[in-house]
Image (cartoon, rainbow, N blue to C red):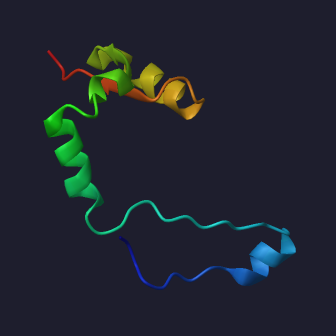
Amino acid sequence: MGKTDIMFPIGIMCGKELHVTGSFRYSAGDYQLALDMVASGRLNVKDLISKTVPFEEAKEAFENVKHGNGIKWLIEGPK
């Protein structure tokens, strides 16, 4: 889950008038629930794969993800 306490440069953040929003990704039991859903067929993870690309196109895949193009891009291993 990461560190319990994190230090922020509050002076810089205030000076730049930054807004910080936190979020919580998961809790105890979520991984097992997800595995159970995949195993039972209730969740088809193949539908989440936007595209599969060869290793040579990995840079383009990362750029597409960075710009919000698709959900999950699979990069094949080098041949």
**Residue 76 placement (x, y as % from top left):** 23, 20
Q: Classify residue 62 as left or right of residue 79.
A: right
Tell me the quarter of the picture where residue 45 sits: top left
Looking at the rendered structure, the number of numbered marks drawn on it comes to 0
The answer to whether 34 appears left or right of 69 in the picture is: left
- Left or right of 36? Residue 63 is right
| Vertical relation: 7 (above or below) 29 | below
Where 30 falls versus 69 (above or below)? Answer: below
> Residue 72: horizontal and vertical position, in percent?
39, 29
User: Which residue: 18% across, 20% down?
Assistant: 78
Residue at the spot 24% in from the left edge and 53% down from the top edge: 33
Rendered-image quadrant of the N terminus: bottom left
- Is 19 left, or right, of 50 in this rendering? right
* Residue drawn at (77%, 83%) of the image: 11
Q: Residue 32 falls in which quadrant of the image?
A: bottom left
Q: Quadrant of the C terminus?
A: top left
Residue nearest the observer in this picture, 30 or 75: 30
| Residue 47 position (above or below residue 43) | above
Q: Looking at the picture, how far across and down is residue 24, in whole percent?
A: 49, 65
Identify the image quadrant of residue 17: bottom right
Q: Where is residue 70 shown, x and y percent of the image?
A: 50, 24
